[in-house]
Amino acid sequence: MMMTQSENSNSPEEFTPTINGNDMSAVRAKLPEILRRLLAPHEDDSEFMTALMTTLVVAGGLIPNVWATYDRRRIYNMLMLFVICPPAGGKGVVSLGGKLLERINKHLSETHKADFATYQHRMEEYRATLTSDELIKLPSKPKRSQLLVPGNITSSKLIQQIADNAPYPTVILETEADVLAGAFKSDHGRLMSTTLRQAYHHERISLARKTNDELIEIDTPKVALVISGTDNQVLSIFNGNQDGLFSRFMFLRNNASIKWRSVKPKAGAKPLDDHYEEWSERFFTIWQQAQNLQAEVTFTESHWDVLDKFGEGNQAASYLTGGDYSVGIARRHALMVIRMAMTLSFFRRINPDTDDIGDLVSDWDCKDEDFDLALLLTEQSFQMSLSLFKAMPQAMNVRFENTKRTAFWAALPTHFEMGEATLTANELGIAERTKTRWISGFRGTGMLEQMGRGEYRKTGMATVATVALSLVA
């Protein structure tokens, strides 16, 4: 489902981005009305996709206590996104996503300022009683909550900020991947990747400090993250394709056209800055209503059946590409479908004229159109992730094995016995132990079924995996 060029296209002017055969007009039409209005100024298709994906990630900060049940666990709609774009190729659109949360951040800053002034006054009263017999309780210093935080942050400060925000989310948006990479590589940022990996699954995070004998504990961290950068900057964030953080990210390539776009202001059109400032106020209105919202988004049996097939097919394709190291890409992208569908479902229930969230006081069902759109967008990310996985640095023995595995699978006939598999392995220089492990892996992913003792047949899942691989650049 990569954004591809039409087969009849011979020039940049004819370039038409598509997602799995759906042009962008179809994707726009499937969006909730409120998102169509927000994204209407983005007429360029690549710019539109960047704005859409960024919005869906930062919107995770709006509904902190809306959840879904996935694999027997409670999950929230937090996503992590890396937008890959060339220099001067669209990072400014990512920054506009941050503007959507600025009014909320301003409110939180003003609230903290007022609370801190009250705290200082009470501290003065407390000190005044130290020499009297009427000692009052020591006031508690107010926490500084900030929904949107910069990427230039240490791991310990990030943990502190997540704790201060809890039970509400923390959203990180950084248009320069190198800024976040610097935090990763610094002495104070060495735990950044670990913190983000834990937060992605809402796993407990704790930090003990010697100073003041301090202990920070976060039971259910919620972190959303958007970063943008060039292809080279991808490697500054992830330490090769075996980095566990890599599979937790969605990826989007901004296919900016090389055709010059007129920069002349359009008559009657307001600057994007003004447009997003207005929407920042609207997001603040929505956020205020949603703070006390406690609800579960539920999915139909049909949705879960489709998701299982999505996961099975992509897991088989992942295993063919990178073995055990890449199956996490497929598994986590299945989770991303549900998280994104939750956000789309929430937006669809908002009145686009009044921004009223209405009667969202109880659980609600995800509509088919929101689930289908989430599946469409996530499939695009999966293909991008698998393509990056193949291109990223990896140990020579791992790269060799991945190449051999694909060749071995392609050489196996549709129906074969173990003796034939052994002969094929010998011809390709594959060890007996490795061949046995791969056959077991192919069976585990559903690509092979055992017909009898030492007799195997490729399944329909094998075809699904092959098709999925053919879509990966």
Image (cartoon, helix red, strand yellow):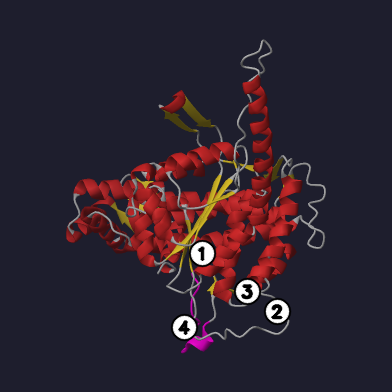
Secondary structure, mark 3, is loop
Height in image: 406 above or below 120? below
Mark 4–mark 3 distance (CA, rounded to whole Å): 17 Å
Badge 4 crowding class, 10 Å Cα cut-off, few under 14, some 14 to 19, many 20 or more, is: few
Height in image: 310 above or below 359? below
User: Residue at (27%, 51%) from the top-left corner?
Assistant: 418
**In this picture, residue 320 sits left or right of residue 432:** right
Judged by its main secondary structure, the magenta piece is loop
Mark 4–mark 2 distance (CA, rounded to whole Å): 24 Å
Residue of label 1 = 380
Q: What type is the residue that disc 1 sits on? A: Gln
Q: Do callouts 4 and 1 mark residues in contact (Cβ within 8 Å)?
A: no
Residue of label 2 = 269
Q: What type is the residue that disc 2 sits on? A: Ala
Q: What type is the residue that disc 4 sits on? A: Ile
Residue of label 4 = 258
Mark 3–mark 1 distance (CA, rounded to whole Å): 20 Å
Number of the front mark, 3 or 1? 3
Residue of label 3 = 42
